[in-house]
Amino acid sequence: MKENAIAIEKLSFNYGHLRVINDISLETPGGVSFGLLGSNGAGKTTLIRLMVGLLKPASGSVLCLGKPPSPANARNIGYMPQLPSLYNELTVEQNIDFFARIYGMRDREKRSRRVSDVIKLIDLWPRRKEQVMKLSGGMKQRVSLGCAIVHQPPLLFLDEPTVGLDPELRVHFWEHFESLTRAGSTLIISSHTMDDAAHCQQLVFMREGKIIARGAPAELRAATGQPDATLEDAFLYFIRRGEVKANV
Amino acid sequence: MYNMFTIAQRTINQLIHDQRTIALILIVPLVIASLIGVSLPSKDILNLTLPAILAMLILFFGFLLSGIAFLRERSQGTRERLMASPVSRLDILVGYLLGFLLFAMVQTLILFFYSVYVLKVAFHGELWQIIVFQILIGILAVCLGIFISAFARNEFQMVQFIPLIIVPQVFVCGLLFPVEQMPDYLQWIAKLLPLTYGVEGIRALMLQGKGLLDIGKDIGVLAAYATGLMVLAGISLRRGNAT
């Protein structure tokens, strides 16, 4: 059995007086795509930021690949934030090369080859010398993904990676994500669309900073008791079940 | 070291791609020096004013450029991305310092040569000592910009810090009026602000033929300010502090 990529124990976080992550415990096996699903404000982005060490928990602990998040452990982690988060004045190539360098790819020749491969993978080779500010939103998303995967991390956090992408590009992204998990990487993907959720091997449904359900998509659908239930039905089922419990 | 140079190189690349900013960095000091050169009534006043402008401009541009660049890092999300990477706070700080100091030195050299060879400002010192002294003010300015940018949420707010942080220093540093002729309380305020020591030091280096060893007090105060601000800037970059 593969060791856990993420181990979270009794994690809580507050923004001021507002509790946005509420006593979450979670373990994810390595080498799978793990979806965090929930509506806006459910706490998905905050949970990812806690996992990569950008926020300090109010209580509880996070382990990524067996270690707490720190600069020393960050080399094994890739992070694609919700916003493209790129240097707009720099070219596509310069952005990806910069992140390759700070993630420890020092050999110039190997790095150059890898950067070229990534640019081809995100399908921007003809525009590699163009400043990022001149690209469309979808293209920026692709560059952002390129920056996150260039150092081939075993653990990758993708915060709403498919937002704003056209359907063709979305399929292209998911094909790549699946190839990464086949190669042994663990992907933690936040999303609020059921289309993304259907691609994940494991899912967590989140609401108001809590986990309301977890399992494989088929298990979550089966839990509704309806043979033809979709993931959307399953999500609504767990929300309503939570509301009923809260009212009892 | 590798990460520091990588960040410095990226900072330089970013500025080089922003050609309008580069043009302003290079032309504005010449415009200011020319205006001062044609408007001041006597050579003596010009000799006192332009060295002070050298110190003032490096503080001003270092503060503004690093502050806005850092703010942009935050608003574009690149700071968050950088903080999730293996780089340390020291890598980020020194990387920024190296990048911005290159432009600050180019600006210093342009203004220096223009002042000495075109406007014929008196010069009895050594250029390398002026560069070392300007680097010290530059370090202070960049750290001040990074630290203050933590209190601004957008570029407009960052610009509002200029009248609060820079302008009072310009008024009391001795650039406009001799510090000794100011009321006592203003003299005390002047003694608390770093630009006063920057102006005093650079005048001594350029006009009085003094060396760096002769202006130990000015260097000491500026170094203390630079160190303090570097610590504060480092604290503002703490991991787990991303907003």
Image (tube, rainbow, N blue to C red):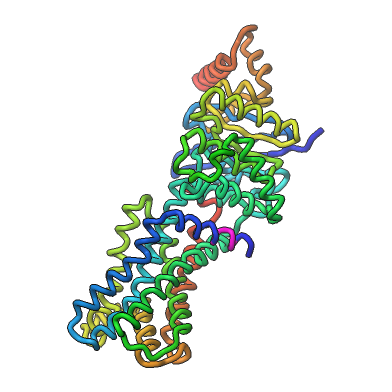
**Quadrant in the picture for residue B19:** bottom left
Q: Position of residue B173 (x, y in %)?
A: 30, 78
Is residue A130 highlighted in magenta?
A: no
Q: Which of A156/B104 is in front? A: B104
**Quadrant in the picture for residue A173:** top right
Residue B166 seen in the figure:
yes
Q: Residue at x 36, y 75 (%)?
A: B111
Above or below — where is B154 with respect to A6? Answer: below
Q: Position of residue B127 (x, y in %)?
A: 44, 84
Image side of residue A181 versus residue B15, left or right: right
| Quadrant, the N terminus of chain A | top right
- Main structural element of the magenta stretch: helix, strand or loop? helix
Q: Residue at x 45, y 54 (%)?
A: B17
Q: Which of B17/A77 is in front? A: B17
Image side of residue B209 versus residue A159, left or right: left
Q: Residue at x 37, y 76 (%)?
A: B194
Q: Position of residue A222 (x, y in %)?
A: 66, 13
> In the image, which residues are magenta?
B4-8
Q: Which of B51/B178 is in front? A: B51
